[in-house]
Image (cartoon, rainbow, N blue to C red):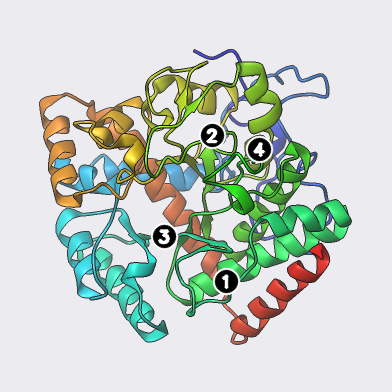
Amino acid sequence: MSQLRPRLAVIATSVLLLGGCAGLTSTSDDADPSTSSSSPSTTDDSGQAAPEAEESEDPDAPTSWGPTTGELEQARELVGSWSSEQLAGGVIVGRFHGTDPQEPARMVRELHLAGVSVTGANVSDRDQVLAMTSAIVDAAAADGRDHPPVIGVDQEGGYVSHLRGIATEFPHFQTAGLAIAADARLGRRVTRAAAFATGLELRDLGFTWVFAPVADVTIGAADPTIGARSPSTDPRLASQAVGAAIKGYDDAGVVSTVKHFPGHGGATSDSHDTLPVLDSTRAELAAQDLPPFESAFRQEAPAVMLSHLDLTAIAPGVPASMAPEVYDLLREDLGFEGVAITDSLGMGAVGGRPTPALQALQAGADLLLMPVDTATTHGIVADAIDSGLVSRSRVEEAAARVVAVQLWQARVAARRPVPADVVERARAASADLESAAY
């Protein structure tokens, strides 16, 4: 178990006393997200762990990642009644090919998938996207679910934007770091507003998740994967940008996914092609890579994406997404309680491993993103549950987190209707972010 950070309390008393739902604050909040939060950190100013608080019996009390304790308990009761096939589907976000809206809908219905990830190859125009997301929602309902499915997309801004030509184009996330460096207060404000507008526009298209923001602190030219996707080479600027973005996405009622834990910006090879080796010491990770993730967790980030990195100081030779030691770092040292999702399981970094999805689930992942063959992976996980190769309790824990965050998403979205002029607002937010940086 990592000792990189003192173990954090599960839910601080000060958080429980808030008694409200996360993510409905005004987008004009100018608090520095890297140093303050609507949910205070469970460490004091000296960095020592705060006393642990007893869990509240109030079902409306918030968790540290969005859902209420009542929603989490509701989710646990639901998944406890699921079959092995339903549980296996409930921890998979599938991939599909082509643009036929009925293909992902069929997969969600027949394999009981938590949802699907949409890529640029799956979209053609706005009407097709709306038909697709609507068909997926209908499929989940036909499967007996009262909570919305995971419908996710990489829409970071810049060149990693799979809805290009359909949704508003935002600049690279590096722009947020530049805006904060130029004027911290204004930069945080426009970053939060940009995330808010992005989230609302995605919801208008039927999405419930966005695979953003990027929390990686890039090392610059030697970083072939992240680059301008990163907010900054400076951990403090990156922390402020990430914290502001999380608050904006929360405001919009979309599930954000801070990535790629514990930080891909220092890797000098591309995990799409190979397993990068990161030789950073624990102290270097703490100083350089972890601060933006800590900022995100203070802002009640609902989900975090695990990278496919070989962290030699923590779990040498094993992708971070499949290493129990990395999940220990995430949950026990940093106190994150929300949904942990792998990076795409179709990437070269994990190619050649016999059962990467099962390894990730056993290590601590809650969602398995885009396995190469969704149906085959579903069968492997279902069989593993039946045989005891992975405990049913581990899979129920994972599936319950997913259901709980989807209950949260539905509740917050219902309280934050998408305005009729959402596209115009998004374009204005994109322009404001760009002008604040340059």
Residue 333 falls left or right of residue 346: right
Residue highlighted by disc 1: 200
Q: Which of pointers 4 and 3 indicates the residue nearer the eye?
A: 4
Using the numbered discs, state the Cα–Cα distance from disc 2 to disc 3 in whole angstroms. 25 Å
Query: What is the secondary structure assignment of the residue under circle 4?
Result: loop
One can see residue 383 in this view:
yes
Q: Which amino acid does label 1 sit on?
A: Leu
Q: How crowded is mark 1: few (under 14 residues within 10 Å), some or many (20 or more)?
A: many
Residue drawn at the location 54% of the way across and 22% of the way down: 332
Residue found at the far front of this picture: 221
Pick the quarter of the image with the C terminus: bottom right
**CB atoms of marks 2 and 3 within 8 Å:** no
- Pick whichever, 420 or 426, lies toward us: 426
Q: CA separation, marks 4 and 3?
A: 28 Å
Residue 53: x percent and y percent? 64, 25
**Mark 1 or 2, nearer chain start:** 1
Q: How crowded is mark 2: few (under 14 residues within 10 Å), some or many (20 or more)?
A: many
According to the picture, the residue beneath numbered tag 2 turns out to be 267
- At label 3, which amino acid type do we have? Gly
Q: Mark 3 points at which residue?
A: 152
Counting from the top left corner in percent of width and height, residue 40 is at 74, 37
The answer to which of marks 1 and 4 sits earlier in the sequence is 1
Residue 301 picture quarter:
top right
Which badge, 2 or 4, is on the more N-terminal residue?
4
- Whether label 1 touches label 4, CB < 8 Å: no
In the rendered structure, which amino acid carries the disc numbered 2? Ala
Residue 268, numbered circle: none
Please give the name of the residue rendered at 43% of the width and 61% of the height, measured from the top-left corner: 153
Tag 1, which secondary structure? helix
Q: Find numbered disc 2 in the image and state the secondary structure of the residue it sits on.
A: loop
Q: Do the residues labelled 1 and 2 touch (CB within 8 Å)?
A: no
